[in-house]
Image (cartoon, rainbow, N blue to C red):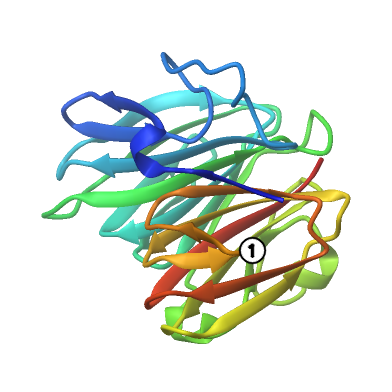
Amino acid sequence: MIEVRPFAELGHADHGWLDAKHHFSFADYYDPRRMHWGALRVWNDDAIAAGTGFGTHPHRDMEIITYVREGAITHQDNLGNSGRTEAGDVQVMSAGTGIMHSEYNREPGKTRIFQIWIMPDRAGHAPSWGTRAFPRGERGGRFVALASGYDADTGGDALPIHADARVLGATLKKGERAEYHLGVERLGYLVPARGSVEIEEKTVGTRDGAAISETDTLVVRALEDAEIVLVDVAA
């Protein structure tokens, strides 16, 4: 079962330095039908102007995954972590018992990100941060775990999160298909960072959202060259 949420119908907030689209209720955007999707609480599609960003602010008890689509984001936190994550790569911040951080666009042009918040499996984890490169070519024609709560994935390249969830990426050429075993008891949420795809005879365009349920094996076909991000969460 697929519900397509067109990009044009998402929540929107333009702060000048930040132009944000919200797949779920967030800040001043409220839609009681879209509070969360299982353990997936936030999916923001942010464009951050050059030389600006999110000043130091706190979080706790949330797994925050940033997928950089264009440009780069520079992170700093009160744990002493700092780093730059560029287009195609991923950073994970486990807010845990509490963390203070900033995220800035230090690049000459706009930075565009997906910011994804997943509720943790329990409160009180130790806070942490990490970043990793995920070359798009290594995701060609298949889904690759970018962040995961499962040892089988984090023993490889996936960044660890404290959640019964996976964040996956794939790049597909026009006409190419990719499959992912979701399981009928699980929920998926898929967004093409670029390009358009077809799922169960429904078209999902660039930056549209697709809320997926009651689906054992997810089959995605690219209608044009596409870059896809998928979240698999507990219902």
Image: 189 above or below 17: below
Looking at this view, is 10 or 39 the one in front?
Answer: 10
Name which residue lies at 38% across and 27% down: 56
Residue 18 position in % (x across, y down): 25, 32
Residue 180, compared with residue 185, is above or below; it is: below
- 28 vs 213, nearest the viewer: 213
The answer to which quarter of the image holds residue 220 is bottom right
Residue highlighted by disc 1: 200
Examine the rendered structure and indicate whether residue 124 appears above or below residue 165.
above
Give me the residue at 62% from left, 24% from top: 35
Residue 97 position, x and y percent, is 70, 28
User: For residue 194, what is the image quadrant?
Assistant: bottom left
- Label 1 Cα neighbours within 10 Å, binned few <14 / some 14-19 / many ≥20: few
Label 1, secondary structure: give it.
loop
- Dot 1 amino acid type: Glu
Q: Residue 216, image x and y in percent?
A: 83, 63
Q: Nearer the viewer, residue 131 or 27?
A: 27
- Left or right of 233? Residue 167 is left
Relative image position of residue 145 (x, y in whole percent): 66, 69
Picture residue at 37% right of the left edge, 50% below the top: 113
